[in-house]
């Protein structure tokens, strides 16, 4: 028996065609938003998927470029090992802050920033990577509130 194919109402794409969001950590943290992101439950967890394949690949390219061009700022001397959660947060949140600053944007929508960066800088390679690396290096997670019970 073949399972019915589930479709996303907004795009008409089968769910299997959706790509994992490259900036899921930033979206879960509330640091950014994306008009193309859809949250999906997976077992007991939750994942974020992109509803447009081209947009997902553009975001994945931006994520990879931030990671590659900001490796020194991240202190990533050893390659090949998976990044820690803190490193992933710095890449995603700090990188998006740097792109937002380069564009002078106030909107934190990832897809719109990627499209604007491609139009303004003639592609993602033309972004001001020194400024983005500074934003990645400067990004710090917000401090947790003190526990009042102790």
Image (tube, rainbow, N blue to C red):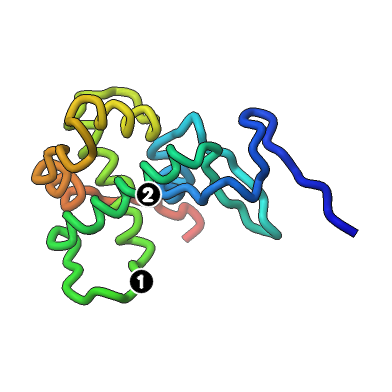
Q: Does residue 6 sit above or below 108 in this rendering?
A: below
In front of the other: 144 or 47: 47
Q: Position of residue 109 (x, y in %)?
A: 39, 30
Q: Quadrant of the N terminus?
A: bottom right
Query: Are the residues flagged by discs 1 and 2 in contact, CB closer than 8 Å?
Result: no
Residue 39, how many percent across, how many down?
59, 43
Question: Which x, y percent locates residue 44?
Answer: 69, 59
Is residue 129 found left or right of 118 in the rendered image?
A: left
Residue labelled with disc 1: 82
Q: Quadrant of residue 82?
A: bottom left
Q: Identify the residue position indicated by label 2 in the image.
A: 60
Q: Which sits in the foreground, 73 or 49?
A: 49
Residue 115: quarter of image: top left
Identified at 51% across, 51% down, the residue is 20
Q: Is residue 86 visible?
A: yes
Q: Residues within 10 Å of mark 2 (few under 14, many from 20)?
A: some
Q: CA distance from mark 1 to mark 2?
A: 16 Å
- The residue shown at (64%, 46%) is 40
Of helix, strand and loop, which one carries label 2? helix
Left or right: where does residue 87 sit relative to residue 2?
Answer: left
| 100 over 89 or under it: above or below | above
Figure quadrant of residue 76: bottom left
């Amino acid at each position: 028996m073949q399972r019915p194919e589930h479709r996303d109402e907004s795009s008409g794409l089968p769910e299997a065609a959706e790509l994992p969001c490259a900036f899921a950590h930033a979206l879960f943290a509330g640091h950014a938003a994306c008009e193309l992101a859809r949250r999906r439950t997976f077992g007991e967890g939750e994942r974020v998927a992109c509803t447009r394949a081209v947009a997902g690949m553009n975001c994945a390219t931006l994520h990879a470029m931030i990671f590659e061009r900001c490796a020194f700022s991240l202190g990533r001397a050893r390659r090949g090992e998976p990044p820690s959660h803190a490193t992933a947060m710095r890449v995603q949140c700090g990188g998006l802050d740097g792109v937002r600053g380069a564009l002078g944007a106030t909107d934190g929508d990832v897809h719109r920033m990627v499209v604007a960066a491609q139009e303004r800088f003639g592609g993602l390679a033309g972004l001001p990577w020194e400024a983005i690396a500074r934003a990645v290096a400067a990004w710090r997670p917000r401090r947790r509130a003190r526990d009042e019970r102790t």
